[in-house]
Amino acid sequence: MSLPRQLRDESDFDQLPEDVAVSAHVADVEEKRGFTVYYAFVIEVKTKGGSKYFIYRRYSQFFTLHAKLELNYGPENSIPPYVCILPVLPPKIYVGSKNEIAEARIPLLNAYMKGLLNSPVWLLLDEDLRVFFCQTVFDSERIPRGLRRLRPQTRKIKQNTQHVCSDMDRSRAEALFDFKGNAAPELSFKSGDVIYLLSRINKDWLEGTVGDRTGIFPHSFVRIIKDLPEEQISASLLRCYFHDDDICHIRDISVEEDVRKCPSYKELLDLIRNEFPEVDVVLNMQDNEGELIRLMDNSDMDLLITQGKRKTRAGNYFPWELHVTRNGDLDIYGTGS
């Protein structure tokens, strides 16, 4: 494995843990929907021990990490000898298509990560840096939709695994044509072979096993006999009450955000407008006496988060609830005639 020159020259590099990241690059960018539409960078990480895996990070997470590193190790704040000139992070951009902005950031973020992981050894041991490049459970459960910048890697499958279910219960496909893999991750097979399916890599590639061999292969080369279960998308739920005339509609809105996230007023308003496109809506919270309080701007968001408590429900629900009314409906506040 090729290591950055600066790391190779340091005598204490061998003392680093095997799970420390030494290289990373963006393999793809995916559109996601949270309180607003955003783009997540699919990053392939390589560790000192030779492991490879994917992580999913937003630009805001890069920005937060960089701010922490500047605070701890930047020339203006740190104490020698723990001073480091950090690579340049691409700045925030407020104007333009989000997709175009994300695409333009890819080479800049690749250069940033290369510079960051070519830093002194002591910086690689920083807790915030290690957490950023560590694969979380959420990362490991996600399947990249379409890796445009590298071929997808297959996972290793333990041999001699005892299957609890019978072969007839397993997801499987029949090979329609011979397929000879061109690279190590690809699974070669003959027409008529039964391939037991493990996962969807993207819309064009599957992962499966034939005999004791495991790898990826094109979806178009097989006929599905029993498909894989539908992919479960990790999401949080926001309980929303829409007060319309004399009826209150309850809706659970799926949001790809951590339940600890506090949105801005605009992000929340945009989300609700997308849910109720035919209605001129306003946002409200309910106080302890059951009265609705109109939310006007960011200054009201802390009030919503701290006092708009939900009733006890599952942990994937946001810990606050939202009440939505039509703009101009003052009766809901008890102030109408």
Image (cartoon, rainbow, N blue to C red):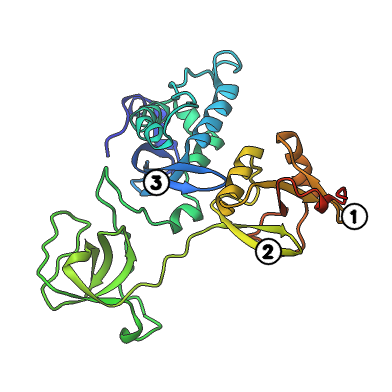
Amino acid carrying label 1: it is Glu
User: What's the CA distance linking mark 1 and mark 3?
Assistant: 43 Å
Left or right relative to 290: residue 115: left
Q: CA distance from mark 2 to mark 1?
A: 20 Å
State the SS at label 3. strand
Q: Nearer the viewer, residue 23 or 196?
A: 196
94 to 147, vertically: above or below: above
What residue would you read off at disc 2? 250
* Number of marks present in the image shown: 3
Q: Earlier in the sequence, mark 2 or mark 1?
A: 2
Name the residue carrying label 1. Answer: 289
Callout 2 crowding tier (Cα within 10 Å): few <14, some 14–19, many ≥20: few
Residue found 19% across the figure and 71% down from its top = 222
Relative vertical location of residue 214 with respect to residue 40 in this rendering, above or below:
below
Quarter-of-image position of residue 17: top left
Mark pair 2, 3: CA separation: 30 Å
Q: Is residue 160 left or right of residue 294?
A: left
Name of the residue lying farthest toward the front = 337
Where in the figure is residue 64, as x and y percent of width and height?
Answer: 56, 32
Which image quarter holds the N terminus? top left
Which of these two is toward me, 90 or 333?
333
Q: Secondary structure at mark 2?
A: strand
Q: Position of residue 109 (x, y in %)?
A: 39, 31
Q: Position of residue 213 (x, y in %)?
A: 22, 68
Q: Residue at x 10, y 70 (%)?
A: 177
Of all residues, the one furthest to the right in this rendering is 289
> Based on the displayed image, in which of its 4 quarters is residue 13 positioned?
top left
| Residue density around tag 1, few if under 14, some if 14–19, many if 20 or more, within 10 Å | few
Q: Write down the residue under mark 3.
A: 30
Comes first in the chain, label 2 or label 3: 3
Dot placed on the residue nearer the N-terminal end, 1 or 3: 3
Amino acid tagged 3: Glu
